Image (tube, grey):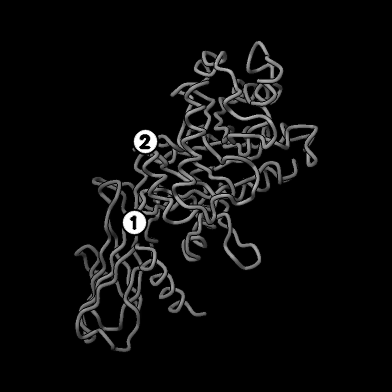
Amino acid sequence: MNDSSMSRRQWLASAAAGVGTLVLGRAARGSVSAPMQIDEPFHGAVLNRRHGRVVEGGLEITVRGQAPLGDRVTVNGQPTRREGTRFAAQVVLPQTETDIVAVSDGRFGRREHRIRVLWDRYSEPRYRFSIDDNSFFLRDIAGKKYDSLFDCFYLKILRDLHARYGARFVLNIYYTTGDDFNLTQFPDRYRGEWEDNADWLKLAFHAYANEPARPYQYASPSKLIADLDLVAEQILRFAGPEVYTPPTVIHWGMVQPASLPALAERGVRTLSGYFRQRGGVWDVNYLLDEVRSEYLSRHDALKDFPSGIVFSRVDIVCNNTPLDQIIPTLAPLAEDPNQAEIMDLFTHEQYFWPFYPNYVPDHAERLDRAIRWVTERGYKPVFFHEGLLGGRL
């Protein structure tokens, strides 16, 4: 498929998703001509200092696109440079969200293409660490009635990483382990200890249970929200509001599009996924269309304006990455301006436990290596539910 076809497909997918707007003048309707559209930046792109130049008044970026030969093209009212069907212009983004409007006028009439982008104004290198599928440690603490939360070896590992590197963690938890334990059985006597460590250790909803797989891929918004509220109620009871955070990862990373506004109403600002292909189909992508999924496979983040949610791509899954591959997995990302600013680090709880069939003996070492590497390179630990992907707004 050539570049023009791909760009047209990008616009069609964006329009279907309610993002980006192309307006054709009367003479253009039904005519055959080169497409007129903005190709870069992508609608919903989250841009930072690596994507342009900070100047007085905002972030200066280059806008590129294509229009019919001979057309007069402006971008946000500014004239463009033309090379064949291509155009380019410098635009300053003055605020967090800015509309970019390209207008062409010529023998095919007047055309307009409008996109919106985000400027991560106060961006700095940062990382977050999210751990999925948590339930075993809660059952362990409740059953053994430890004097301290950190008598559980799993939480002690995380506390040691925090002490060593300042790491912060969000533990995404289930309502039940699927046997005879659920969150109502977890005591509130540790609430003071939870609150004392709330600056670096948070709890969030993940799902009702580990099984069935993909529980919300076809579920109604009401089912997802009911489960979220069930877990949130218990976290607030036994740990307190300082520990609770809106979720940033839903089990299996798949929900119905209609669930996104409902999640936003519960305070969800960011959702992380893999945005990768499996058998030629995009998966763990919250059912975003293939064009946005492909974009996210190569970029840190993208905003869905109808819901207000920013999607983030997971950079590494430690339980799936051998110890000697941790750094080779992360290092190339730090060299790519589209992926270098934010490191989305990730793993799953069950691989810490020796009774689990797929137990990973060096799991803690993998986390240590990943966190040490980002820390030594100046990445700061953040929580994605705060500000814009953990950064200042």
| Chain-order first, disc 1 or disc 2 | 1
Q: Residues within 10 Å of mark 1 (few under 14, many from 20)?
A: many
Please name the residue shown 67% across and 37% down the image: 178
Furthest residue in direction front, as rendered:
180
Q: Nearer the viewer, residue 14 or 242?
A: 242
Which numbered marker is on residue 392? 2
Q: Callout 1: helix, strand or loop? A: strand
Identify residue for label 1.
61
Q: Nearer the viewer, residue 376 or 385?
A: 385
Q: Residues within 10 Å of mark 2 (few under 14, many from 20)?
A: few
Quadrant in which residue 257 is drawn? bottom left
Please name the residue shown 71% across and 22% down the image: 153
Residue 341 locus on image (x, y percent): 48, 44
In this rendering, the answer to whether 183 lies above or below 28 is above
Please name the residue shown 44% across and 24% down the image: 241
**Amino acid type at mark 2:** Arg
Residue 222 locus on image (x, y percent): 44, 47
Q: Callout 2: helix, strand or loop? A: loop
In this rendering, the answer to whether 16 lies above or below 191 is below
Residue 199 locus on image (x, y percent): 49, 22
**Amino acid type at mark 1:** Ile
Q: Nearer the viewer, residue 40 or 129?
A: 129
Q: Are marks 1 and 2 in contact (CB under 8 Å)?
A: no
Which numbered marker is on residue 332? none
Q: Nearer the observer, disc 1 or disc 2?
A: 2
